[in-house]
Amino acid sequence: MNVVQRVDALVEAPVLVFGQPPPHGRDLDLLVRPTDMKALADGLEAAGFTRHGKRFVSFHECSADVVEVVPADDWGLPAAEVEELFGAAHPLDGAAKVLEPGPAHALLILARRGYLKPKARVRAASILASDATALTEARRRAPVWGVAPELEALAEGRAPRPRRIGRPRRGTLVTLSGLDGAGKSSQAAALRDALERVGYHPVVVWTSLSQHPPLLHAITRVARWLLGPRRPDGRGEADPGRALRERSRLVTFAWSAVVALTNAMEQARAVAPHLWRGRVVICDRYTLDSKVHLRYAYGEERGFGFQAALIGHLSPRPDVAYLLDVSPETASTRKRDYPLEENARRGNLYLEEAEGLGVRRLDGERPREEICAQLAGEVWDFLAAR
């Protein structure tokens, strides 16, 4: 059942769609008579929609239904004009009480918006071309609507009125951590798609301490060349740097600090520009994964507090952080990058470090669609409350 059918099944009185309904539009914009507002709001909430102001969202599986409910009083039209608007409307295909406006009113609604995206301009052109009387009727009503100049611009195909663009507020950083095979990439993509449905423009970025940037690779190659004892064939041992680290705590400390510093710089480079533009950034791996890898690669018995502090202070701080927790068996079945016993070690490290970093644990063994819905709902609640 799509969102139009869901709304049509629960409304008691007619409601008017004043935007492009799904699937062509992102959400369902409804104009409602003031006397019907409470009943519709209660019905939406009873049907599982969460309310934030005029918007109602229902996250299900890995998608979302979005309904925006606007009282007709907000448009400032006389009561008689509102009744004319509803009276000239007709049901959407497959619906009984969810109505779409008649051609003349559709033009008035488009003119009222002022700025029109390309799809809306195409819609206006289609109405003008298909209904010769629509423009005449719209012009008659335009003074009451207060959109006479905008309607003429629409009729003449002139450039839309420009919007004032303010400076965006800082974006939001959401991070997903966990073992390889926990479902981070899948959930990041699903969360991005769900947030796009509710009007955000999220971006997914991937960061990993285990994948060193070019500078660190260059340092590693030089270290191998300098430190590796030479054999008769001129070749050095496979990893002399690792051998030296195993012999010296000081070298381990210094090298892991360089790795942490480089990782922090890479995380900031990948994330900060999007946050400055006000976007929602979803990170596949972040500081928790970095600290776990430090301990896994350079000594589980060490805390690496200095290195973790470097990453934490130099990287943008997450607003919402999750650990997708799965069993070592599940991780090893989904991805064979690590043997079962090593996934068990790394899984314990994730649980040890998550609480100290304020990362919330989620049961990653649940069905994918169930996790998608929970993540999207909680992140949207956070965004709506800002």
Image: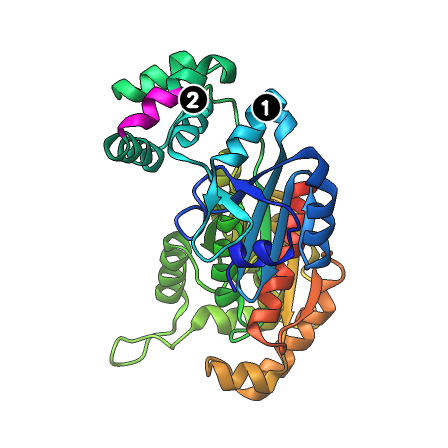
**What is the chief secondary structure element of the magenta stretch?**
helix
The relative height of residue 80 versus residue 305 in the rendered view (above or below) is above
Q: In this view, does 206 lie to the left or right of 79?
A: left
Magenta segment: 132-138
Q: Name the residue under label 2.
A: 114
Residue at disc 1, secondary structure? helix
Q: Identify the mark at residue 286; answer none if there is no mark.
A: none
The relative height of residue 324 versus residue 258 in the rendered view (above or below) is below
Asked if disc 2 and disc 1 are in contact, CB closer than 8 Å, the reply is no
Residue 73 rendering spot, x and y as whole percentages = 65, 26
Residue 51 rendering spot, x and y as whole percentages = 69, 47
- Colouring scheme applied when the structure was drawn: rainbow
Q: Is residue 135 magenta?
A: yes
The relative height of residue 218 versus residue 18 in the rendered view (above or below) is below
Q: Is residue 178 left or right of residue 279?
A: right
The answer to whether residue 310 of the structure is visible from this angle is yes
Mark closer to the chain start, 2 or 1: 1
**Foreground pick, 136 / 73:** 136
Residue at 76% over, 62% down? 355
Q: Name the residue under label 1.
A: 80
Residue at 43% over, 54% down? 93
Residue at 62% over, 51% down? 57
**Foreground pick, 338 / 326:** 326
The answer to whether residue 269 of the structure is visible from this angle is no
Crowdedness near tag 2: few (<14), some (14–19) or many (≥20) residues, C-alpha within 10 Å: some
Q: Is residue 296 left or right of residue 301?
A: left
Residue at 54% over, 40% down? 16
**Foreground pick, 85 / 119:** 85
Residue at disc 2, secondary structure? loop
**Foreground pick, 144 / 352:** 144
